[in-house]
Amino acid sequence: MKGMMKVKICILSGTPKSKGLCQSVIEAARQGIADAGGEMGEIRLCGSEIERCKVCGNGWGACVTGECEYGDDGFNEIKERVKDSDAVIIATPVYWGETSEALKSFLDRLRRYDFHHKEVLVGKQVLLIAVAGGSGNGILTCLEQMERFCRHANAHIFDYIGVNRWNNDYKKQAVKEASFAIASGRKSGETVKY
Ligand SMILES: Cc1cc2nc3c(=O)[nH]c(=O)nc-3n(C[C@H](O)[C@H](O)[C@H](O)COP(=O)(O)O)c2cc1C
């Protein structure tokens, strides 16, 4: 990797906790990225000032053609950080079979903006991780919700990883290796020999 630019990966985190199962999965991703010589920036949406979409005007709002009218609440800043990254990991605890609300609020606004502007996530690899630490139910609906976001944002889904209390040993390994693969520059659709 000498002389090469480091691959920049941004993690959009939906966990409110600084320790716990979801954070330990994020640490596995961090390790994979570091092992590949990449750079990781973690963005925690819980506790941010970012508000839900106000659904301006007739429903499409100013962000159809311009900027979000409320972007100064931190939305624009995070949007630029995501735009500036080479790939993205979205990691969330499963709440009610969905992503955490704080992450969802951000993704809702980013989707509206990027669906039209096609400048933040278009063609970008995204790794989706849902961490269900309770019953283990809701991983599929949570991943499906994030998948829909990626489709609307024209992103390239690299993988879907569902983690629970009884599989997290080997799923953390999968998260680490998927993160390593992305940070090493593996392209979606590239065949891996077996
Ligand atoms: C409001 C709320 C809703 C939750 N809903 C689910 C759920 O639908 N399925 C599940 O397996 N766990 C559920 N959990 C447990 C979280 O998934 C769990 O806290 C998290 O995924 C991973 O653990 P961590 O909090 O230690 O990071 C819920 C937790 C909270 C606080």
Image (cartoon, rainbow, N blue to C red):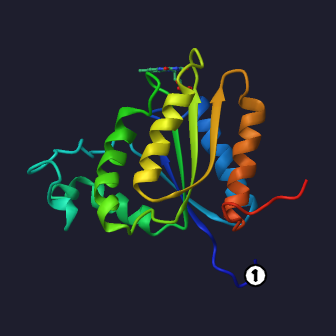
Which amino acid is tagged 1? Lys
Q: Residue 116's x, y, as percent?
A: 30, 63
Q: How many marks?
A: 1
Q: Residues within 10 Å of mark 1 (few under 14, many from 20)?
A: few
Q: Residue 188's x, y, as percent?
A: 66, 61
| Residue identifier under label 1 | 2
Disc 1 C-beta below 8 A from ligand 1: no
Residue located farthest toward the top when viewing the structure as drawn? 135
Q: Is residue 14 left or right of residue 58?
A: right
188, above or below 47, in the image: below
For the N terminus, which image quadrant? bottom right
Corner quadrant of residue 168 = top right
> Can residue 14 be seen in the rendering of this structure?
no
**Residue at x 60%, y 43% (from the top left corner):** 26
**Residue at x 38%, y 69% (from the top left corner):** 119
Corner quadrant of residue 39 = bottom right
Corner quadrant of residue 48 = top left
> Can residue 101 be seen in the rendering of this structure?
yes
Q: Residue 65's x, y, as percent?
A: 20, 67
47, above or below 177, in the image: above
**Residue at x 61%, y 29% (from the top left corner):** 21
Residue located farthest toward the left when viewing the structure as drawn? 57
Q: Residue 56's x, y, as percent?
A: 12, 49
Q: Secondary structure at mark 1?
A: loop
Residue located farthest toward the right when viewing the structure as drawn? 194
